[in-house]
Image (cartoon, rainbow, N blue to C red):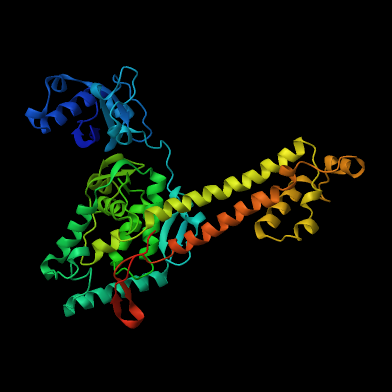
Amino acid sequence: MKISVRVRGEWLQVPCRNGEMTVRWLGDESVRRYNKLQKQDDIKENREMEKAQEVRKTRGGVILDPDDNIRDVLDDNDFVTVVVASERSTTGTIIPENLKHILEPVPAKYEPPDEHIFLDGESLSTNDLRQLGKGRYKIKLTHEAEIKVKNARELVEKILQEKKVVYGITTGFGKFARTVIDCDKLEELQYNLIRSHAAGVGTPLNPEKTRMLLALRINVLAKGHSGISLTNLYALIKAFNASCLSWVPEQGSVGACGDLAPLAHLALGLLGEGKMWSPETGWGNAKDVLAAHGLSPMRLNAKEGIALTNGTQLITSLGAEAVERAYYIARQADVVAALTLEVLKGTSRAFDSDVQMIRPHKGQIAVAKRLRALLHSETHPSQIAESHRFCNRVQDAYTLRCCPQVHGIVHDTIDFVQGVITVEMNSGTDNPVSFVHDRYVTTYQLPQS
């Protein structure tokens, strides 16, 4: 019996024979093995002597009783986290901020989704992206997208075979655009690009935002203009479907020329480097997390490093989440307005369709229609509305009568922003880009995001 144990962010595999030893033994043995692997000069005396404070199941964060036998509470190849005394305060909270996400519990009950969303780089909506972020769907490519990606990669391979000088494929990047790279150094260049740009700081994006980022990058690559191989695009999809999510720091994007640092961190984990999270393992070394799901690190070919990092998908995915939240908040505000009018015993006459058509703004008309449906209709007449037929009340307060006008412009603005973001979500943002139908590759200025 073997147990995968995380101590101070590092993964160890501890043999437990037949599991007859206690959980307390597992914790202390894991700390002993961890200290043994560290440089002795770097280990303080109190670190050498300290014991495991508690042992938790990595999935769900359940604390295990130290006196229980291992075989009674854990399965073979199970995952646990050992928390040592110096990582906890007197109140039991974790002290180091940099360990907050490493040690936070993962969902106790995670059910992989059964349904799929097909991506083609053309038709992803903000709602679809948010549902992907919540883990409610897996991803598949459309057949047309597979063909486009395959053909674009063949064009890149043709350029390599003919030894043409093309920016980003056979040259360096940015200032080194005129530096031609030797053929035997092109793959190394891709890894160096990702490692050098993985320089973000701060706490990582939460799993939902990271899923959105990964899903959106897959969608953009599915357009078939970036030149990534179908093999590596499928590697991204497999990682997404398994919820193997790289450590992507919240801070570090320059925006103007793309989310280079966040996308580099996203790619770094898929290369088996850095940190990664999954519902099965929690945070751990990317290579170990991938292996726990039967996945192998990606191997990059020429052009694929820049294909993975050149884009605006972080800012766009966060914008998509914001506009989706704004949409639902605005709809809730319409309900709040209707309830407010009802509580104040107001009339819905100001929302009549004839009144609204005098100034037929799209959002205003839609809000008035919703208010009428909520307040008074022939199917569901309102006693309050009927009472206004013969009362001496002239009109309601201005703030109530003008809800369609005020709320309407908010809905119109949200619709406009949603349209802009939807276009960006389904846009190619790489440089250079491939055009298979005319068999050429060109460079262009990536617009400010």
Q: Position of residue 83 (x, y in %)?
A: 27, 26
In this image, 257 relative to 161: left or right?
A: right
User: Does residue 397 lie above or below 234 as drawn?
Assistant: above
Q: Give the position of the N terminus as an image quadrant.
A: top left
Q: Can I make out residue 337 in this image? A: yes
Q: Can I make out residue 114 in this image? A: no
**Residue placed most toward the observer, 4 or 169:** 169
User: Does residue 449 lie above or below 198 as drawn?
Assistant: below
Q: Give the position of the C terminus as an image quadrant.
A: bottom left
Q: Position of residue 240 (x, y in %)?
A: 36, 53
Q: Residue furthest top?
A: 90
Which quadrant of the structure image shows residue 202? top left
Q: Residue furthest right?
A: 390
Instruction: Write the residue at 18% across / 71% down.
Output: 170
Which quadrant of the structure image shows residue 226? bottom left
Instruction: Write the residue at 18% across / 20% down.
Output: 50
Instruction: Write the residue at 22% across / 70% down.
Output: 169
In this image, 81 relative to 183: left or right?
A: right
Q: Position of residue 370 (x, y in %)?
A: 71, 51
Q: Position of residue 414 (x, y in %)?
A: 56, 54
Instruction: Write the residue at 22% across / 37% down.
Output: 11
User: Does residue 251 lie above or below 227 as drawn?
Assistant: above
Which quadrant of the structure image shows residue 68? top left
Q: Residue furthest bottom?
A: 438
Figure disc tally = 0
User: Does residue 423 lie above or below 392 as drawn?
Assistant: below
